[in-house]
Structures are given as structure tokens and as C-alpha cells.
Amino acid sequence: MKRVALIGSGFGGLAEAIRLQARGYKVTIFEKRAKVGGRAYQLVKDGYTFDMGPSLITAPFIIERVFHAAGKRMRDYLDILPLDPFYRIYFHDKTYMDYSGDPVRMKQEIAKFDPADAKNYDRFFEDVRGIYDAVITDGLGSKPFDSWTSFLKFVPRAIGLGGMLPVYSYVSKYFRHEHNRFAFSFHPLFIGGSPFRAPSIYIMIPYLEREAGVWFSRGGMYSLVQAFEKVFLELGGTIRTGAEVQEIVVRDGAVAGVRVGGEMQEADIVVSNGDVPWVYKNLIAPEHRVRRWTDRAIDRLHISMSVFLLYIGVRKKYPQLKHHTLIISKRYRELVKDIFDRKTLPDDFSMYLHVPTRTDPSMAPEGAESIYLLVPVPHLGASIDWSTAAGPFRERILAFLEKEFGLEDLRKNIDVLETFTPVDFKEQLNAHLGNAFSIEPRLTQSAIFRPHNRSEEIRGLYFVGAGTHPGGGVPGVLLGAEATEACIVADTTR
């Protein structure tokens, strides 16, 4: 029975642990924090419940496959609810779009801004289907991309599908109005990428949403964490919380185990669900990574942006907020450049609000609202001192919501107000440069160019999560768990 030490317990790590434990490996999860979840943590305070990270389900069938691998049924552990609309998008000119999976209603929404754009909706999705089929139907997202042969076979297909174009450029072929272009190009921001350079292989996300819906798990996304944890324990797995790994021990080019609390924990296999750049730099001695992931190579990586998060418990209802609400600045391209390239904290901002009480009132006291607010900001490579910038930035956001957006008397009704900055990503989650989504998904950092699911240098070391193939987001890390499982099984059953 192969012993597996698994570092971290985000969605990718938990899915990997379930898959390997179900196959007969002896898996122990080592988690730094007090409970499992990683970036999908939970905050409960004064009767309010907040998901601290991922906030939506876009591919229930991919989640179902994790339960199926363990011989379980998702419906026995989880109660998921469909959302309609998926998002309400408020634009700077006071117009809005209710974005859903219903083609008839979506054409009406698109036509509000440009009737000609509505006529291209069907053609857009017909063309995007080819990319979806490549990633999901044909399983490229769930297979390791660690050989040039497989990559070079895929390149002609990707070019033919337009998958090498930036997402915004791809969308612009079908839609003329900027509001419509935004609605179908913003999705890379959900996985840490710029819509103006993330390759259109990621354009399959809107298709995935339309085909499989957007869902919410009753009790919050942390209920999915708890369901995975329960399945893993039922399979006989071991979880050690408050157990931060200090070193991945390597002997003769292969893993020997991990060092936790100064003690050696021997293992035949080590799987890391930690942030890949941070893990290579901080847990593996430089002499064991001389070919590919040297400190210099890691420093050349383009790291995803971070986010500024507010968790707001307010004793008042705001019906203009849907379950998922986006509020968009007048500047789209320039705001993205400020965050990704100029690395400045701009005066304006776009934001995403998750209001689960719209669907599940139990997540706040009666008559109250639980609000998770996310604003994209630069990572810690920027010259921003969050010890002094966080307070004023928070007040600007609250003032905007109250005075300009119309959340009347917001500040006087706040019961809970918690802040999470890029510094917290670094200190609490061991995220390199305080990133929110690990390595930025750009063309030169996708597929074979991302850190591989199987370490290129150290035998018995594997990666799962946002920093490896195929990338971030709940569907991405769960597909990555399948790819990593395939690597481990192939390497240990020869």
C-alpha cells in the first residue's frame, strides 16, 4: 500500500485524496489551518455565514465524478440549487444585463444594447462548442499535458478553433457593443487571467455554464468541502489539521516524505495542493530543482492578480442584488491593465458580489444579508502598502455602494465587516506574492507550459490545484485532480 502525503486541502487536494484513497493508497492530508478547505474556507460570525473563496458551481457533473470515484452519490451528501439568472451585470451607465443560460432571454438581453449582436448569439455558441468538446468532451482538461508530442498534436486543432486568440478578441468577432463583449469575455478574471491575453481555450466557460448551469450548494460552498471531507474519512483517510509542512524531503532524486512540526513523515508519494511557485521556492531545497523550477525560473513566471475581499453582514435586505452581481467600471481594458501590468491601485474599480442569502436565507439572521465582495487588485509585486491602504480602500468601496450604487444606509446597518487583502493570501494561504489564483493563465503559461501535474525533476512528487494543468476555478482543479491521479496510477502500477 503506497503511502501518500498530501499537502493542503482545497477542492483539488480533497478530490485527489478521495480518488487515491478509493484506489487503495494510504493518504494523509496535512493542512496548515485549523480546518480543511484551503482557499474555499468559511467564516461564521454573529449569525452570518460567509464563503471566503469559490462561490459557485458551474459543472456539477465534474463534481459528481469525484463522488463516483469513491462509489458514492453526490445527492447523498450535497443539496445543490440552480441559479437564474446566473449573474446580474450592472454597467456604469446604469443599464444592466441578467445573464442566464436561456438562449431566448439572452438574445433579448443582448438586443437591449445591439440587436445585431443578438443575431450572432447562436453562431458564437456553435463555434465555442468545438473548444468545449476539446477540453471537456474529449477530456484534454483532465489528462496530463506533459509531453511535447501530445501538445503538438493539439496545436493545429487549437489554431483551427481559434483557441490561440485572446478571449476578448475572440468575443469581438461576434459582438459589437462593449457591454455584450464584456458579458462573454470576463470569465478569465474568475480564474486569475486577463481577458485581453488569456487564450480562447478558456472561452469554453460560457458554454459550460449554458450547458450545465450555474449552481449553489445549500449552506454555502463550504458544504462541498465538508462533503468531500466526509467521503474521504469514510474511505479511511487521515486528516491532520494545524500541521504545516516545512519541507518536502528528497533523497536521490525522489521524495522520501515531508517534515511537519520538525518531525519526518515518510511517504512514497507527495502530492502538493499548495501554491506551486511557493512550494517550489519554500519547501524544496534548491539542489533538487536545478533543471526546471529554479528560483530564477519561478521569478520569471507571470503570477495572477490578487483580490481585495470584504465579508459584510448587514441587517437589511437589498433586493437589487442578485445571488451573483457584477458592478462594472466604465474602464474595462484600462482597469485590467492597471491591475495586471501597471500594478497600481486605481481610483475606480469593478466588483463582484456574492449574496447567498438571496438563495439560502439561513446564511444570515432573519431579515439580514450575507455579502461577499471581491475587487481585483494587483499582487504584492506592486508598491502598495496594504497596512495603510486597506482601510481607505474599504471605505471608498462602501461609500460607492451606498452613495452611487444605491445600497441605502449600508454602513449604518453593518453588523459584521471583515477584510482579506493580498497580505492575507500570502500569510494565511502561503500564496506567492499574495496571489488569488496562482499562475496567470496566458498562452505561454497554459498546457505544457504550466507546471506539470507530475514534477519534471523529482520522482514521486505531484501537483494538483490552480497552479498546475489545466488551471484555476472549481472545474479546473477537479479536472486537474483527474490528470494527477492518472500520472500517479501510471507511475505506480508499471
Image: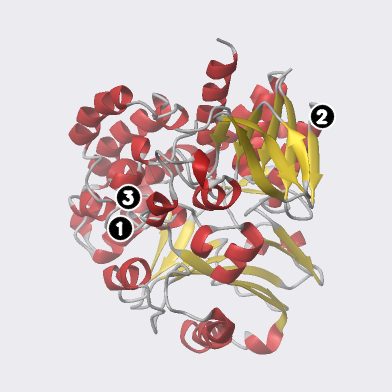
Q: Which residue is mark 3?
A: 442
Identify the residue at image location x=35%, y=42%.
446
Q: Where in the figure is residue 198, as x and y percent of width and height?
A: 31, 51
**Please, which colouring scheme is shown?**
secondary structure
**Relative horizontal placement of residue 175, taking residue 233 as reference (left or right):** left
Q: Where in the figure is residue 410, as x and y percent of width and height?
A: 62, 84
Question: Viewer-nearest of labels 3 and 2?
Answer: 3
Identify the residue at image location x=31%, y=35%.
131
Identify whether 108 is placed above or below 334: above
Q: Between marks 3 and 2, how big is the CA–CA gap? A: 39 Å
Tell me if residue 76 can be seen: no
Label drawn at residue 234: 2
Question: Viewer-nearest of labels 1 and 3?
Answer: 3
Residue at the far top: name it: 494
Secondary element type, mark 3? loop
The amino acid sitting under disc 3 is Arg
Q: Which residue is mark 1?
A: 110
